[in-house]
Image: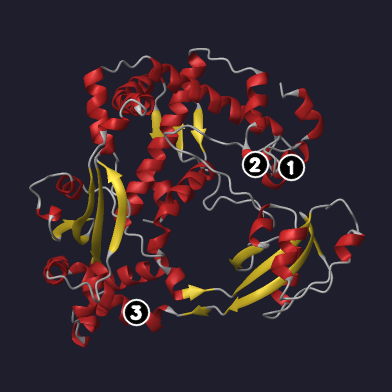
Amino acid sequence: MLIEKFKKNTSRAIVLMIIGLISLVFVFVGVFPAATSIVGDTNVARIGDEVISIQEFQSAYNQEMQSFQKFGNKVPSFFLAQIKDRVVNGLVQQRLILLEARRLGLFISDSEIRAEIEKQEAFQDENKKFDLQRYRDVLEMNRLSTHRFEAGLKDDLKRSRLVQFFRSRIRVTEEELRREYTVANTKRDLEFIRLRNEDAFSKMKVGKAEVDAYLGDETKLSLARSHYDENIRKYKKEDKICAHHILNNKKELEAAPGDFLGLRLTAKNFTKMAKKHSDGPTKTRGGDLGCFGRGTMDTSFETVAFALKKGQVTKEPVKSQFGWHYIYVYDRKKGFEHKFDEVKVEIARELIKKDRKDEIKKINRAEAERMAKRWASGSKRGLNISATGEFTRVQSAIPSIGKVSEIMDAAFSEDAQIQSGPQVFEALGGMIVAKVKKAVEPDFSKFESDRKAQLKALQTRKLQIFFPAWVESVKKEFPVKVNEKLIDEIVQI
């Protein structure tokens, strides 16, 4: 079943999901062990006889979360709920497309699979040519069987072909195309200030008597304990080290290669030497593995790494399941643990404040209006103003803000206050003060040169309108069951 040339030379592979509905990306790792399930082998969803595993959901969810990293550990729960729903719906939709493609008998040949493999950048050398050794190395690091790779890639191509089949049969008129060009090339760039509920906390007063009464109530004390357990990462952090490594991936050797042993390494030259001599995906960033705690890395690697002091480099290579490593620890972060009794007063105050929704809204509304007035007067000093960058009306959400229809409508309305000055919006669990920084109108002199791209964009939009009804019809053939409780445990909303 597998392409014979690759079967002779390869034992591992990586699945690259390329459907535009949702992308699942495998992170290339060097010394990190395989991810394990946090709640056993229970599946996230079942579609007909197919299942969506915890690992599939976590991979897709982690990718979606990357765009929210700027929030740190303060991603609002309503954002998490939206992301969760988007990921689940995307995965279910992918599986339904595949099931329908199989039912229709769509066929993908071995030559098509081979062509897809050879054009993946991950398997190409510096000259953009397919590199069999690089292919082998990448597959091995991802620890995926060739059977799983080929099956996944074949399924992916089937889904893509079915979507292309639908798109090719969507008709577009000239009037629709011109309207699409107008909408797609009318752009706005906003400046905005975000006020979250937590921003009001510093202005709220909670007396000792109120805290004592709260903690004296068994039900509320239980809520405080649950809050502590659910946010344990805030109150307990393990020791971590931050390290670079240089990897020689000849793991089959009982002793490190001679040229590897001959490296003369110091803290000062380690990053430069890693870029020159290391194997694996961390090479381009000087072997930087970031910061990690115990239980994350290969055991042999971790034992030696945690024994190093800050600024130390291993004198001899260390053997792991991935090969031979030199390690340089460039920082150590001391952990801590605050027991519940030490922080229960702080938690009680926080929970009491959260319950005062009207007061939060009143404080943030007043602060937002004060900022808007100051901003309108021409003074930006002390205001934490961000920018969205350019976006269009057809986008599902405003960059850096999110899906807020009121702000989206105002941004493209000539009469809205936001066009000439800051306007206050109640949105996403807080307040947003926004104004139009720049308005871009369409240039029809470029209409003909952009015709093909606009046609494809409009076909895609029509496809998105058609798809929900199509999905519902397919669900009648392949019933969908989603394990919401398990998903909420994974996401920890």
Q: Is residue 441 above or below residue 29?
A: above
Q: Which mark is residue 22?
A: none
Task: Determine the secondary structure under disc 2.
Answer: helix
Q: x%, y% of residue 25?
A: 54, 43
Q: x%, y% of residue 356?
A: 16, 69
For label 2, the residue is 122
Q: Are marks 2 and 1 in contact (CB under 8 Å)?
A: yes
Q: Is residue 217 above or below residue 260?
A: below
The tally of labels here is 3
For label 3, the residue is 344
Image-quadrant location for residue 147: top right
> Between marks 3 and 2, how big is the CA–CA gap?
50 Å
* 352 left or right of 95 in image: left
Three-letter code for the amino acid on which mark 2 is drawn: Ala
| Residue 47 visible | no
For label 1, the residue is 134
Image-quadrant location for residue 77: bottom left
